[in-house]
Image: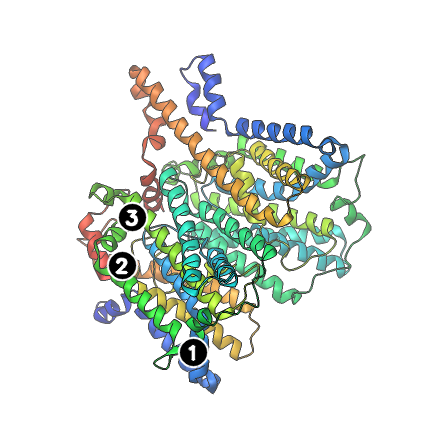
Amino acid sequence: MRSGSRLMRILGTTGVPIAIALVIVILVFQVLSPVFLRPSAVSNYLNNGIPILLITVGVAFVIVGGGIDLSIGTVAGLSAGMTIWAVGAGMPTPVGVLVGVATGLVFGVVNGFVITQFGINDFIVTLATLNVAGGLLIVLSENVSLRGVNAPGLASLTQGSTLGIPTSFWIAVVIFVVMQFLLMRTVFGRRLFATGVSSEAATLAGVEVRRVRFNTFVISGVLAGAAGVLLASRLGAVQAFLGMGYEFTAIAGAVLGGVSLAGGRGSVWAAVVGGLMLATLQQGLRLNGVDPVYFSIVTGLAIVTGVVFDRQAQRLVLRRNVGGGPAQAVGAHPVAPEASHARETGVKS
Amino acid sequence: MSTDQSKARVSVLERAGYRLLLDPTLGVQAMLVTICVVAAFSFPVFLTEVNLYNVVGSSIIVMLLALGMTVVLIARGIDLSVGAVMALCAAVTAEALLNGYPLTLAAPMALATGAAVGIANGLLITKLGLPDFIATLAMLGFASGILYIWTGGVPIIGYMVPEFYYVGGLTPLVGSVTVPMLIALVLALVLGGLLGWSRLGTHLFAVGSSEHSARQSGVAVHRVRILAYVISGLMAAVAGIVIAGRNTNVPADLGTGYEIQAIAAAVIGGASLGGGRGRILGAVLGALTLAVSINLINLLGVPSSYQKIVIGAILLLAVVANRLSEIVNAWARRRRLARAPVDHEADAPDLGPPTVPAESLKPTRKALR
């Protein structure tokens, strides 16, 4: 352990192990089926994967703040439905995009408000709004036609390309860069990490924990809305159950990337890599003729692997910091770590 | 349980007042009665024997799941896998019957499946330290994935044997009373006794109220939590056996959405997600309230596609109401404390949780893990 400590430090950085694993998995699939890395196949699977990657990043913010958001999947589905409905009703594309994003925003605000103002368990609230959003999409799809909409403007978001690369790819990259900046280089990001490590300590350090947590749900909602717009653009039609189960894949991706479900650790790029890993596995399994049903099992295993790995990494960090070790992960020890440590952790991960 | 602490040193009248405010099941009873009265006045059909038995019959599955969910919630856990496990156990029962096993063997097979899943959930949560809802969410995906692969997405049919019509409640036993109703009644009594009078029951409440204190007092916390998930798995298995008989076919998506109904019923019945609170009677009434609400919606002629939204809204209302009752609870205790300053020291151990601001509850839980 001691001799390999430098290597361990690099490997212990959030997102690095999964990035290495991703490269290996890609190589394996390339060997198994040579079409895997063909440009058309890659752009196809990126296009398929990007909506879920956006949700993954959104939920990563909530998880870093020590919360959870289960509503994102059906909210994305509902946003897609709303976008198609708006465009189908003859509104111009930008309005349609706005309608989709606004739908996500509304759900984010409702989630954040109920959770932070009443102090109710976040996952039960978002489980309820998951049902509300899913139910609204069913009702919407029964009352208006959500297929056969001719919207070249909307479709060009995913089917068009800029500089030879699909437009949706550019959109996603811009969003990821902005989000990574927000998480790592802004006051909000610092406060978010502090909140996730210990909301008690953050409160004592003057952070308005409620507002920070509220903001994470808004971010998650807006990104789910954006994901819905891209889904609408790619599919061109929305069926009643769109988005169901996406939250599971998104949370799994974030956790696999090293975003700690205990809160306070993670990064946007790590979440993206984790999400890409799942998308790659899905694509690879499909190309090799594996029943897509197995994917839900793979996702479940991914979560377990991610959490177990996270615990091991945490133990490693603890062992390294003997002496000045934080109380944060010792368990059964309600003493909060100092806020300065929270900041340190934020920078490191 | 939460009223235990308020028993001391309060006048009878005051106690009655507090009970009204604090006892969650009283709220549910009031809600249930209100909905029933509204329904009875608006729709004469509601009070007919056929309709009432239908409502009770349709609530049984959710009730069975809610009973198990209440036990898990008391221990400060959550089980999202109940719907999928129920479907899996239904498939086990159906396949066993198809292969010629008698019901007396098929049912234990399903129960064993449910118990095994419960143990797996418990081990993932206690030994690997996965958060409860992540572990059981993964188990949901796992169980429904297995079921899809096993059945190939084709519903299992043609397994009905004569006595299974009784188990499913399709053939009533006496008058309009069906076997599932009796099963639910017996299991509710058993679980009520378990929670109220057994050592395990006390331990469940102790673990849910404060895992740290429970461990310090020598409670085998891990074993208690695993047992809570085993009970939930067993209840899901019973629900699976009943629904296999009731449905006469087992599609792979049979259990979809049942977990949220079970949670809603338990929470309406006063179980708290913060652990340490919950009542068997509450779960029974909660399931009935859900069933009556759905019945009322149907009578109103609202399309069934709205059902999902309504259940989500009911759950949201229930948690908000639950939370408000907790706030009132804390306020009442503080007031009592202010009025009787002499009792400060004697009261002190009872006063812990509610005076802590809501935001800080989470990290405390984290620290205790």
Q: Position of residue A101 (x, y in %)?
A: 41, 58
Which disc number belongs to residue B220?
Answer: none
Residue B353: quarter of image: top left
**Labels 1 and 3 within one chain:** yes
Residue A312: quarter of image: bottom left
Which disc number belongs to residue A212?
Answer: 3
Q: Earlier in the sequence, mark 2 or mark 1?
A: 1
Q: Does residue B233 appear in the picture of this structure?
A: no
| Left or right of A204 in this view: B344 | right
Q: Secondary structure at mark 1?
A: helix
| Left or right of A343 in this view: B112 | right
| Left or right of A238 in this view: B128 | left
Q: Earlier in the sequence, mark 2 or mark 3?
A: 2
Question: Dot 1 falls on which chain?
Answer: A
The colour scheme is rainbow
Q: Position of residue A229 (x, y in %)?
A: 44, 63
- Badge 2: few (under 14), some or many (20 or more) residues near its Cα, within 10 Å? many
Question: Dot 3 falls on which chain?
Answer: A
Residue designated by label 2: A183
Q: Position of residue A328 (x, y in %)?
A: 27, 50
